[in-house]
Image: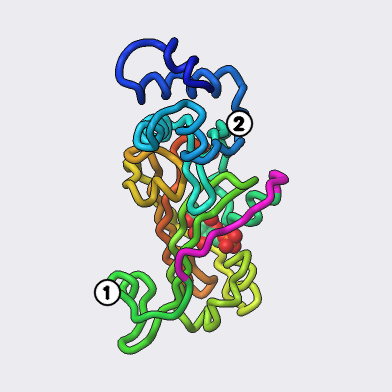
Amino acid sequence: LSAEALQNAGRGPLYMKLRQVLEEAIRGGKLEQGEALPPERDLAEIADVSRVTVRKAVDDLVRDGLLVRRHGSGTFVSKPVSKVQQSLSRLTSFTEDMARRGFTTRAELLERGIFHPTTEEMVMLGLSAGTQVARISRLRMANDTPLAIERASISTEFLPEPENVTTSLYEELDRTGARPVRAIQRISACNVKEADAELLGIPAGAAGLSIERVSYLASGRVVEFTRSLYRGDAYDFVAEMTLGE
Ligand code: 16G
């Protein structure tokens, strides 16, 4: 990148030219996948343009998915994700699913604690009046790529100490003797809203899968009501079917 390269790049407003130079650097591999983009200030200086111009060019590339902004750590060249093939027939946890694939997992905690339940939580979890609910919301990542946002609600009877959930919710439920054995999962299509898109590192409005899981103990009692938002570009859900009678 240089002021000269910018001069020679295409037509249109300055920010479009800058966008083009950056796009070529990404597509040509001069900026590698996963690599951090230099700070706006530096880019402005090198290209001899204002920071507003830099921001507009970068915004454009983020919107088109070539760059991703990560909360508090900067802007990076996107890594294409190969899709996770996720079976719909086994009741497994995110941690187990990713470990089986040899991925390292990490979660960014969005919310964790004990709260007054909403009416929906009371109904879904069958809570009696006056009881509280444990909530855990996480941005879930595999090999540092954000894949999903999961917002779980669990009766405090089964999860009295939500702060114990540092890696796996199901592991903690195993410990409290409330690991679910059955679940109903509903999957529907959605367009990811801006705030969630930012967390997932995808353009606002991109395709997502909205998933609700209600899971049960052998006794038939509901353990978990989880609303999740999965990246549409990162997941294939696969079910095996057999001929019924
Ligand atoms: C899965 C479940 C989620 C559950 C989580 C526990 C979906 C689509 N999936 O991701 O309901 O809460 O596993 O994972 O909802 P953990 O034990 O790794 O925290």
User: What residue do we see at 41% from left, 47% from top?
Assistant: 198
Q: Secondary structure at mark 2?
A: loop
95 lies above or below 4? below
Q: Secondary structure at mark 1?
A: helix
Q: Check disc 2 and report the residue beneath it.
A: 33
Here the colouring is: rainbow
Extreme residue in the right direction: 102
92 lies above or below 46? below
Q: Check disc 1 and report the residue beneath it.
A: 119
User: What residue do we see at 39% from left, 10% from top?
Assistant: 10
User: What residue do we see at 38% from left, 73% from top?
Assistant: 125
Q: Which residues are magenta?
A: 100-111
* Of the pair 240 and 185, the residue shown nearer to us: 185
Q: Is residue 66 left or right of residue 207?
A: right
Q: Is residue 178 magenta?
A: no
Q: Is residue 93 left or right of residue 64?
A: right
Mark 1 crowdedness (10 Å alpha carbons): few <14, some 14-19, many ≥20: few
59 lies above or below 170? above
- Please state which amino acid type lies under the numbered disc 1: Thr
Q: Position of residue 169 (x, y in %)?
A: 57, 67
* Of the pair 61 and 105, the residue shown nearer to us: 61
Q: Nearer the viewer, mark 2 or mark 1?
A: 2
Q: CA distance from mark 2 to mark 1?
A: 45 Å
* Of the pair 44 and 149, the residue shown nearer to us: 44
Ligand 1 under 8 Å from disc 1 Cβ: no
- Please state which amino acid type lies under the numbered disc 2: Gln
Q: Earlier in the sequence, mark 2 or mark 1?
A: 2
